[in-house]
Image (spheres, grey):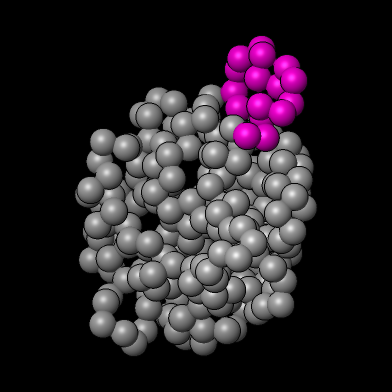
Amino acid sequence: MREHAGAPPDPGASRARRHFPSLAGAPCARLDLDAEFRRWSAQQPGLLAGGGPSPFLDPAVAAGMLSEVHAAAGVAWSFGGYLEDRRHLLSGSYLDATSSWLHLGVDFNVPEGTPVAAGAPGRVVLVDDDGDRDGGWGRRVFLRRTGGDVDRVAVFAHLHAVSCRPGDLLAEDRPFAEVGGPPDNGNWYPHLHVQLMATADFETMLGERFRELDGYGRPEDLPELATRFPDPLTAW
């Protein structure tokens, strides 16, 4: 956690809260998930001794770790992860093949079933489910920002109980889905993933290579990735 007693308020927290009206009064903090995993696993004798995939890939283990981290920090939920290098957290996953360790969105670590709001006015352009239960997106909603000076699309992923359809115009505080759980959310621990891209980039991928869209990229491509996928906490 990056908060400590006497620290100035994190402006990202107020932006994060826009997505969860039901958690408005619950304390939260920014989290470096890879760093927390390294600290947590170092306190678990023998956890990594046998090698193999990261234990965080087990949704039950991941949820248990986050519960401990939140309790120790005195918060109910957390957020963060934009351009975070997760090579320790997700070792042994599908990312090994390409070394795509950079996380391209923000994760909101909230309980399964938490209602999700857009956080800004947006029009639904696509609702789908990739059907991948081994590190996939699960149920997704793509929103195109309405108003503002920048034309962007946000993907909200790992969802459940989606209640919107393409063409719907969503107010910033209107819940349109819930945070899903494993295995239907891609078989991750319960959390919301939000990732931004330019509308033109989204439309190109939709027409030509939509299945290539991923939540991770290679560290050596950082400058390009930071431009193509801006920070949802500041650019949405």
User: What residue appears at the point 32 percent right and 37 percent down from the top-left corner?
Assistant: 218
Magenta region's main secondary structure? loop
Relative horizontal placement of residue 34, taking residue 73 as reference (left or right): left
Query: Residue 98 location, x and y as percent?
Result: 36, 29
Tell me, yes or no, whether the highlighted magenta stretch contains residue 229. no
User: What residue appears at the point 67 percent right and 78 percent down from the top-left corner?
Assistant: 24
Q: Nearer the viewer, residue 111 or 45?
A: 45
Relative horizontal placement of residue 139, taking residue 190 as reference (left or right): left
User: What residue appears at the point 59 percent right and 73 percent down from the top-left corner?
Assistant: 17
Query: Residue 189 location, x and y as percent?
Result: 67, 47
Relative horizontal placement of residue 4, taking residue 12 as reference (left or right): right
Tell me, yes or no, whether the highlighted magenta stretch contains residue 44. yes
Query: Residue 151 location, x and y as percent?
Result: 27, 75
Classify the position of the C terminus by image quarter.
Answer: bottom left
Q: Nearer the viewer, residue 170 or 19?
A: 19
Q: Over which residues does the magenta segment extend? A: 39-54
Relative horizontal placement of residue 29, taking residue 88 as reference (left or right): right
User: What residue appears at the point 71 percent right and 22 percent down from the top-left corner?
Assistant: 47
